[in-house]
Image (cartoon, rainbow, N blue to C red):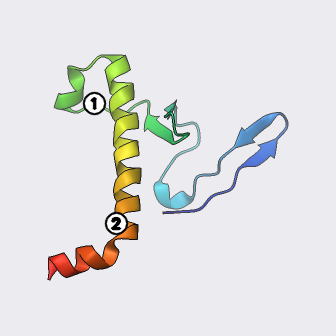
């Protein structure tokens, strides 16, 4: 996980994305926000997987946001119970 801090230029707020993520200048994204405030960027030029091709636009948005929420919950559970998971893995 990379910590970034917003910056203001004029009336706009920007979120710098570190080079390690390989984002190119001018690349376009869809931006979604879940009910808990999580922001999800989805490349506009990405090709949907076979599973996503049958989903409507609204359903795809929900799926992306749900995945981001699931990832957040999983990270939270793992960080709180890491020792237990390590014991179980042995």
From the viewer's perspective, is residue 2 above or below residue 41? below
Q: Residue at x 51, y 48 (%)?
A: 23
Q: Secondary structure at mark 1?
A: loop
Q: Residue 11: percent from the left, percent from the top?
A: 83, 33
Name the element at disc 2. helix
Could you say where residue 82 lies in the image, as x and y percent from the top left? 33, 74
Residue 36: percent from left, percent from top: 52, 39
Instruction: Report the residue that reaches farthest toward the right.
Output: 10
| Pointer 2 residue | 78
| Nearest the eye: 37 or 6 | 37
| Of residues 82 and 39, the one drawn nearer to the viewer in this rendering | 82
Horizontal side, residue 88 vs residue 68: left or right:
left
Q: Quick one: label 2 or label 1, which is nearer the N terminus?
A: 1
Residue position for label 1: 48
Note whether 86 is above or below 33 in the view shown: below
Distance (Cα) linking label 2 and label 1: 29 Å
- At 31% across and 79% down in the image, what residue appears? 83
Q: Residue at x 34, y 66 (%)?
A: 78
Label 2 with label 1: CB-CB less than 8 Å: no
Count of marks placed on residues: 2
Residue 89 % position (x, y): 16, 77
Quadrant of the rendered structure where residue 59 is?
A: top left
What residue is drawn where x is 68% and y is 56%?
5
| Of the pair 71 and 46, the residue shown nearer to us | 71
């Amino acid at each position: 996980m990379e910590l970034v801090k917003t910056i203001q230029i004029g009336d706009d707020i920007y979120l710098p994305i570190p080079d390690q993520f390989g984002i190119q200048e001018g690349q376009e994204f869809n931006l979604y926000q879940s009910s808990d405030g999580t922001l999800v960027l989805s490349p506009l030029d990405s090709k949907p997987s076979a599973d996503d091709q049958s989903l409507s636009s609204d359903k795809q948005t929900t799926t992306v946001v749900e995945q981001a929420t699931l990832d957040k919950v999983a990270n939270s559970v793992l960080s709180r119970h890491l020792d237990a998971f390590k014991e179980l893995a042995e």
